[in-house]
Image (cartoon, rainbow, N blue to C red):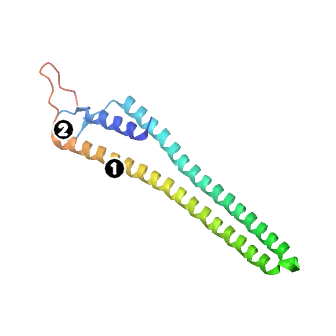
């Protein structure tokens, strides 16, 4: 279940909890379901954090692969450049071609770096939005809980006996 849905369920439990008689700020919440919901939320949040760490690991792997590919392309370009330079008849054109290949390889390496940076930035921005929404939801829940405390005492039905505390 989505952590936001779990937080919403916890808020609903607190919102629908009976007020403690003669208390403006207290409510009675069944401990078992509340602890179960909080345990479930605690279990799901680390998975989101693990997902973020996995994204960072994936970014590192992509960057390493991009660097290796760029190094390979540059190496091939340099090798091609050296081969072309060794041929006396086409020395000038070989230098130009080698320089072009190296330039393209560097441009490709830069493009790959930028793509990886954009991917990671997007993934981190999504995770940041998730955390921001989670914090906002928690803050709303706390505000609702505080508002319920301020509302006043528990007003029971006529046939209901007051609680002994």
Left or right, 155 with reference to 53: left
* Alpha carbon distance from label 2 to label 1: 27 Å
Viewer-side residue, 73 vs 91: 91
What residue would you read off at disc 2?
Answer: 23
Viewer-side residue, 18 vs 70: 70
Judged from the image, the secondary structure of the residue bearing numbered disc 1 is helix
Viewer-side residue, 20 vs 41: 41
Residue 136 to residue 160: above or below: below
Q: Which quadrant of the view contains residue 10?
A: top left
Q: Position of residue 102 (x, y in %)?
A: 71, 72
Question: Local crowd at mark 1 within 10 Å, few (<14), some, or many (≥20)?
Answer: few
Judged from the image, the secondary structure of the residue bearing numbered disc 2 is loop
Q: Residue furthest left?
A: 158
Q: Residue at x 44, y 54 (%)?
A: 128
Marks 1 and 2: in contact by CB < 8 Å?
Answer: no
Q: Position of residue 161 (x, y in %)?
A: 17, 22
Residue 32 to residue 83: above or below: above
Q: Earlier in the sequence, mark 2 or mark 1?
A: 2
What residue would you read off at disc 1?
Answer: 136
Q: Which quadrant of the view contains residue 38?
A: top left
**Quadrant in which the N terminus is drawn:** top left
Left or right, 129 with reference to 84: left
């Amino acid at each position: 279940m989505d952590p936001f849905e779990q937080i919403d369920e916890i808020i609903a439990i607190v919102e629908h909890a009976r007020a403690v008689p003669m208390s403006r700020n207290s409510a009675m919440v069944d401990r078992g379901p509340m602890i179960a919901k909080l345990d479930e939320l605690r279990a799901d949040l680390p998975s989101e954090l693990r997902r973020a760490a996995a994204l960072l690991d994936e970014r590192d792997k992509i960057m390493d692969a991009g660097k290796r590919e760029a190094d390979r392309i540059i190496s091939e370009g340099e090798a091609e450049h050296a081969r072309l330079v060794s041929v006396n008849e086409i020395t000038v054109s070989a230098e130009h071609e080698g320089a072009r290949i190296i330039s393209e390889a560097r441009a490709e390496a830069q493009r790959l770096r930028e793509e990886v940076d954009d991917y990671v930035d997007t993934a981190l921005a999504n995770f940041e939005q998730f955390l921001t929404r989670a914090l906002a939801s928690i803050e709303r829940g706390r505000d609702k809980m505080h508002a319920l405390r301020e509302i006043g005492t528990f007003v029971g039905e006529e046939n209901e006996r007051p609680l002994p505390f």
